[in-house]
Image (spheres, rainbow, N blue to C red):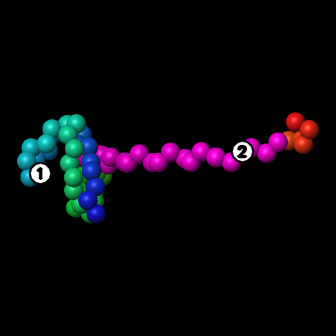
Amino acid sequence: MIQKYEVTRQVLFDRLYHAGETYEGNAAEVSHLVANGVLKPIRAKADAAPKNKAEPKLKNKAG
């Protein structure tokens, strides 16, 4: 599975990557680089929680 990673220090893969650039690679192939701190996984932002569209129930019927 291809994932995006942030390069934390200069490294030579298919080309020279500098700190701050992004690298796309297979998670199984770059796991040792993540463990050594060369790459940091970029997590996708989670979707916002759905808002409650139903009207809230009243505490008493008089209100």
Type of amino acid under label 2: Glu
Judged left or right of residue 45, residue 26 is: left
Query: Residue beneath label 1, please?
Result: 13
Point out the stretch of residues depicted in magenta: 37-58
Disc 2 or 1, which lies upstream in sequence? 1
Q: Residue at (15%, 38%) from the top-left corner?
A: 18
Position of 55 compared to 50: left or right?
A: right
Identify the residue shown where x is 26% and y is 59%.
2
Instruction: Measure the C-alpha gap from mark 2 to mark 1.
Output: 55 Å
The secondary structure that dominates the magenta segment is: loop
- Looking at the image, the residue that sits furthest to the right is 62
For label 1, the SS is loop
Residue 43 disc label: none
Q: Depth check: 26 or 34 in front? A: 26
51 magenta-colored: yes
Question: In this rendering, would 15 be left or right of 6?
Answer: left
x%, y% of residue 19?
20, 37
Q: Quadrant of the C terminus?
A: top right
Residue at 7% in and 47% down: 15
Q: Is residue 36 left or right of residue 58?
A: left
Which is more foreground, mark 2 or mark 1? 2
Residue 55 is tagged as 2
Q: Relative to residue 1, is residue 43 depicted above or below?
A: above
Is 25 or 39 nearer to us in this picture? 25
